[in-house]
Image: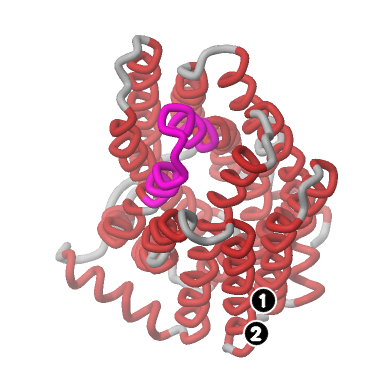
Amino acid sequence: MSAVSSSSLWRQPVFTGLFASTALLALGGQIYQLALPMILYELTHSLAAMSNLRAVEFLPNLLLAAFIGVWVDRVCRRSWAQRALLAMAALLGVCALALAGGGMAAWLFYPLTFCVMLCNYVTAICRMALVKESVPAAQLVQANGYLGSLFDVFAVSGPMLSGLLIAWASPHWSLGAPALMFLLSSLLMARVPALAPRGSGERRFLAELAAGWRTLRGNSALWQLSWVVVLANGAAGVAEVLFLFRARDQLGFSPGQLGLLFGCAGAGGIAAGLCVARARRALGLGRMICLALLLEAAGMAAQALLSEMPWLAGAMALQSFVVVCGNVGVWSYRQEATPAALIGRVSGLTGSLFKLLMPLALVLGGVLSAGMPLRDLMLATAAWQAGAGALAWLSRVRAVA
């Protein structure tokens, strides 16, 4: 991409406002997403509890994404992104105070996680729709790469901060600090111009949802890609929880060491965000997605087999690189292939599909871990992921330019 087109992305007020707001959202999210399962583990010392918590994270996507998608296509996306961020700040702030006072029972982590992730998903769909409406089609991959890499940029510092807050400060700070960041993120979102919602005629939920469904089903490559992502996300969700348990319980890594390990892994994601547009031009979007899925399976196998910090950090950095390339590829193709007026509904429908297996897979992973060697279970998730990559290669996804 030319220097002119690259620099013009930073002169677009919607993108620059979203970038600033997303930066704080990404940092806060990286802190609390590691802190919640770690705090719960310290309270319960249970892998099943951690797996169930991760399963609850995906229930808003699974159960409510279609409703959220229809709603987002009706409303001012900037305003509702701000409201969702404020709600996340309030929820985490109240729970941080409860944890500081000793009144945070373990079971409260589940409704907290559900509500925070619901608000986070509203913000994500609003952000995707705003990018679709404001960024030229030729720059969508680059814009998604920059926004996606923010989560990996702060993966370098977020998990480390989370581990340090848990280990050397007080656990409630690992919830209170993200609450402040989400509040600031909402304020920065005010820089994004408020775009009036598109007219959709008579507003009937089923009719609007059916229009989004027809658009999704009419694109065979996007439809097949959605089911590939269903399988891949199921494997990745289980692998992440199993590795966290292996690192903490079997390898004996401290929260600070875990934060450092995940922080090192974020370096690969940073590199991917910077060069994903070039990878797309060199390989084509479909081939990039397929190769990312296959290489991610190799990274999962490495997490099951390696034990030394330096080797694990290197393997996770490479895995993060391909994960970001694959994710940006999926997001970009969904945006490119969907009309702006339907982007919320198609994003909601695919969001529900993407998480379809994750709650079941996570609960099943927690159950199987009680009677199956952890390494064998982790290698099984790697094989599952490799199968998803093979299906993508054999489908219409590979031909997407």
- The x and y percentages for residue 24 are 56, 30
- Dot 2: element: helix
Between residue 246 and residue 28, name the one nearer to us.
Answer: 246
Q: Quadrant of residue 341?
A: bottom left
Q: Residue at x 44, y 66 (%)?
A: 354
Q: Quadrant of residue 391?
A: bottom right
Between residue 275 and residue 16, name the one nearer to us.
Answer: 275
Q: Is residue 272 left or right of residue 167?
A: right
Q: Is residue 196 above or below residue 109?
A: below
Q: Is residue 131 above or below residue 231?
A: above
Between residue 355 and residue 274, name the one nearer to us.
Answer: 355
Q: Residue at x 82, y 59 (%)?
A: 2
Q: Which mark is residue 393?
A: 2
What type of secondary structure mainly makes up the magenta span? helix
- Between the residue at mark 2 and the residue at mark 1, the CA separation in whole angstroms equals 6 Å
Within the magenta stretch, is there residue 48? yes
Residue 11 visible (yes or no): no
Crowding at mark 2 (Cα within 10 Å: few <14, some 14-19, many 20+): many
Crowding at mark 1 (Cα within 10 Å: few <14, some 14-19, many 20+): many
For the magenta stretch, what is the residue range?
Answer: 33-55
- The x and y percentages for residue 129 are 45, 55
The residue wearing badge 1 is 290
- Whether tag 2 and tag 1 are in contact, CB under 8 A, the answer is yes
The disc, 2 or 1, on the residue closer to the chain's N-terminal end is: 1
Q: Residue furthest top?
A: 101
Q: Is residue 70 above or below residue 122?
A: below
Q: Amino acid at mark 1?
A: Cys
Q: Amino acid at mark 2?
A: Trp
Q: Is residue 67 above or below residue 220?
A: above
Q: Is residue 65 left or right of residue 12?
A: left
